[in-house]
Image: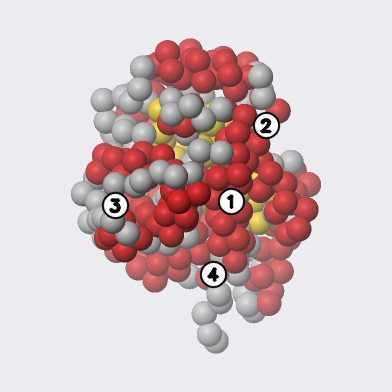
């Protein structure tokens, strides 16, 4: 039997920074359109810089390049291109992170960001039955005041959002700093997630759960260092949105073969596979599934479990989740796998 195609496996993407889908060619296109001079000689010159030593070395380029995003149309075009690639790799539901503080500080109106991303999501919903939503991420390495202010602006458009998250440089910026901001967001019905345990310690994962009431943990791979925490995550069915190619590119793990994904799965943790910043890390979500399945010898049933986990952990209505789980069953049936 040939191996089933993991690209066509229906899945939900739960950890995706829209700014991290900015491919070098689109960066130059938008720079031209907005009459901005990028500090890179060419598309190839920019692409050649996608060689990182840690999270900060990536973030430096990520924040520099996103300067080309200026208008609602820019955000719509960026999101349209992402959804095209993602749906070609099996994505049926996408929860999209965005970093408004990084744009508002450059004079981009908050509305232009959410309306642009929202328009592309609405088109994909109408034309391709893709569902999804927006998760506003606070920049943890900026003063907390900035997060409070952007939340105040965002609450005017709270219906455009499904949740809040926490990203950017992790070490030295513990979740506890953002307890009050998250309290406010949750009081307005927003879901909560947080990056924790990517470069930072396992204790940041516990803090994100206890203080921010995070419902999912983004990355979370350093949970493997704390057996009691692993047991808690498994028991409480808290999803980790793991991004294997990101972890290799940012050197959170030495290589894919050493990735703790299998260990976490075998401990009963609800692991999902996602792409993080696919334009920068060498692949979109299907590429992550294929790479990690190859490196860790995941069986087709294990890959299917990862996709089921993604749907089960999504902030989507129950009927949508049931429909997507049926789509996964259909994929398994066509691949000749036993239904679970
Ligand atoms: N980690 C933290 N912050 C980020 C990332 C990431 O991988 N990508 C974009 N912002
Ligand atoms: Zn991330």
The correct choice, above or below, for 242 with respect to 64 in the image is: below
User: Foreground: 99 or 40?
Assistant: 40
Mark 3: secondary structure:
loop
Sequence-earlier tag: 2 or 4: 4
User: Circle 1 sits on which residue?
Assistant: 77
Q: Which residue is mark 4?
A: 6
Residue 228 seen in the figure: no
What's the CA distance linking mark 2 and mark 1? Answer: 18 Å
Position of residue 70 measured from the top left corner of the image (x, y, whole percent): 51, 38
Q: Mark 1 or mark 2, which is nearer the start of the sequence?
A: 1
Q: 194 or 108: nearer the eye?
A: 108
Which quarter of the figure is the C terminus placed in? bottom right
Does residue 141 appear in the picture of this structure? yes
- Distance between the Cα atoms at labels 4 and 1? 27 Å
In front: mark 2 or mark 1?
Answer: 1
The crowding category of the residue bearing disc 4, from other C-alpha atoms within 10 Å (few below 14, some 14 to 19, many at least 20), is many
Residue at position x 55%, y 86% in the image: 1
In the depicted view, which residue is nearer to us: 6 or 139? 139
Q: Which residue is mark 2?
A: 160
Q: Local crowd at mark 2 within 10 Å, few (<14), some, or many (≥20)?
A: some
Q: Position of residue 283 (x, y in %)?
A: 42, 62
Label 3 vs label 4: CA separation?
Answer: 35 Å
Of labels 2 and 4, the one closer to you? 2
- The local secondary structure at tag 2 comes to helix
Mark 3 highlights which residue? 40
């Amino acid at each position: 039997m040939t191996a089933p195609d993991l690209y066509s496996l229906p899945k939900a993407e739960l950890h995706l920074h829209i700014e991290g889908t900015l491919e070098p060619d689109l960066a130059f296109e938008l720079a031209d359109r907005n009459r901005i001079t990028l500090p890179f000689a060419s598309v190839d010159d920019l692409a050649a810089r996608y060689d990182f030593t840690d999270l900060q070395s990536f973030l430096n380029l990520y924040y520099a390049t996103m300067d080309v995003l200026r208008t609602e149309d820019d955000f719509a075009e960026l999101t349209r291109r992402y959804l095209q690639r993602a749906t070609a790799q099996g994505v049926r539901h996408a929860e999209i992170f965005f970093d408004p503080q990084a744009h508002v500080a450059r004079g981009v109106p908050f509305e232009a960001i959410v309306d642009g991303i929202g328009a592309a999501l609405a088109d994909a919903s109408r034309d391709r039955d893709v569902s999804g939503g927006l998760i506003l991420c606070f920049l943890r390495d900026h003063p907390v005041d900035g997060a409070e202010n952007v939340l105040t602006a965002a609450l005017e458009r709270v219906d455009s959002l499904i949740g809040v998250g926490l990203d950017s440089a992790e070490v030295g910026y513990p979740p506890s700093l953002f307890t009050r901001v998250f309290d406010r967001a949750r009081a307005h019905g927003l879901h909560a997630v947080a990056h924790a345990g990517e470069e930072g310690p396992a204790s940041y994962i516990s803090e994100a759960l206890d203080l921010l009431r995070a419902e999912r943990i983004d990355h979370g791979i350093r949970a493997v260092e704390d057996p009691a925490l692993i047991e808690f995550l498994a028991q409480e069915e808290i999803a980790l949105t793991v991004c294997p190619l990101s972890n290799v590119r940012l050197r959170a793990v030495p290589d894919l073969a050493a990735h703790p994904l299998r260990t976490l799965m075998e401990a009963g943790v609800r692991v999902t596979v996602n792409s993080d910043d696919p334009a920068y890390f060498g692949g979109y979500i299907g590429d992550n599934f294929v790479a990690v399945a190859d490196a860790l010898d995941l069986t087709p049933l294990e890959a299917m479990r990862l996709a089921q986990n993604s749907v089960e952990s999504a902030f989507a209505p129950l009927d949508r989740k049931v429909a997507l789980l049926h789509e996964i069953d259909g994929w398994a049936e066509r691949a000749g796998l036993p239904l679970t």
